[in-house]
Structure formats: structure tokens, C-alpha cells
């Protein structure tokens, strides 16, 4: 059985600290997220693969499964067909 993957993450805007729970896409990373409150466009921090990893309460699904995400950083990508 797979571990339970959490698909909702509470994003906290670094500008105004507004929080919103968002559903995460399972097979794609979300690079940009616009804060609903102050309309700041959030981008991932350099070490992170997506906005959920940088600003969310829960990391994105690939990270939860200990798999490399779609970004190249310094993790070996684990592409599986
Ligand atoms: Zn904001």
C-alpha cells in the first residue's frame, strides 16, 4: 500500500500572511501562485521545487513520496514510465 499522500496544502503568503488551503496537482509542480489577498505572485525559493514546498504547510506529492520532483535542482530525477 502506498503511504497516504496529502493533496491539500495551506499556503501562507510571505507578504501579507494570508492563508489559503489549495489542492495540489498530483503529477505536476505548481511554480506560481497568486495570493488572493494581496495579489503577490509567489515563486518557489531556490532550493524548492514548487510553491507548496516553499510556502505550503505540506510539501508537494512527489516530495511526500521521496521522489524527485519535476525540477532539476540537485536531486537525480527519477523518471518512471
Ligand atoms: Zn498576500
Image (cartoon, rainbow, N blue to C red):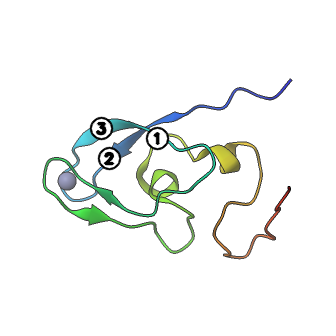
Task: Specify few, some or many for label 2: CA neighbours under 10 Å numbering under 14, 14-19, or 20 or more.
Answer: some
From mark 3 to mark 1, how far is it between C-alphas?
Answer: 10 Å
**Residue topped by disc 2:** 12
Q: Give the left or right position of residue 26, taking residue 68 as reference.
A: left
Please indicate whether residue 57 sits to the left or right of residue 62 in the image: left
Q: Identify the residue under disc 1.
A: 57
Q: CA distance from mark 1 to mark 2?
A: 8 Å
Q: Secondary structure at mark 3?
A: strand
Q: Nearer the viewer, mark 3 or mark 1?
A: 3
| Dots 1, 2 in contact, CB < 8 A | yes
Front one among 29 and 53: 29
Where in the figure is residue 73, as x and y percent of width and height?
Answer: 66, 75
Mark 1 or 2 closer to N-term?
A: 2
Q: Mark 3 = which residue? A: 20
Q: Earlier in the sequence, mark 3 or mark 1?
A: 3
Tag 1's secondary structure? Answer: loop
* Mark 3 / mark 2, whichever is N-terminal: 2
* Image quadrant where one finds the C terminus: bottom right
Label disc, if present, on residue 34 of the rendered structure: none
| Residue pictured at 38% horizontal, 62% vertical | 32
Report the residue at 68% width, 75% height from top.
72
Residue 22's image quarter?
top left
Residue depicted at 74% across the width and 60% down the height:
68
Question: Whole-percent x and y of residue 67?
Answer: 77, 53
Q: Residues within 10 Å of mark 1 (few under 14, many from 20)?
A: some
Left of 4 or right of it: where is 10?
left
**Quarter in which the N terminus is drawn:** top right
Amino acid at each position: 500500500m502506498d503511504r497516504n499522500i496529502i493533496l491539500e496544502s495551506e499556503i501562507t503568503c510571505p507578504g501579507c500572511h494570508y492563508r489559503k488551503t489549495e489542492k495540489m496537482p498530483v503529477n505536476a509542480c505548481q511554480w506560481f501562485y497568486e495570493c488572493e489577498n494581496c495579489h503577490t505572485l509567489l515563486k518557489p525559493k531556490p532550493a524548492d521545487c514548487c510553491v507548496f514546498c516553499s510556502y505550503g504547510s505540506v510539501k508537494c506529492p512527489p516530495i511526500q513520496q521521496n521522489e524527485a520532483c519535476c525540477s532539476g535542482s540537485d536531486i537525480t530525477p527519477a523518471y518512471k514510465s
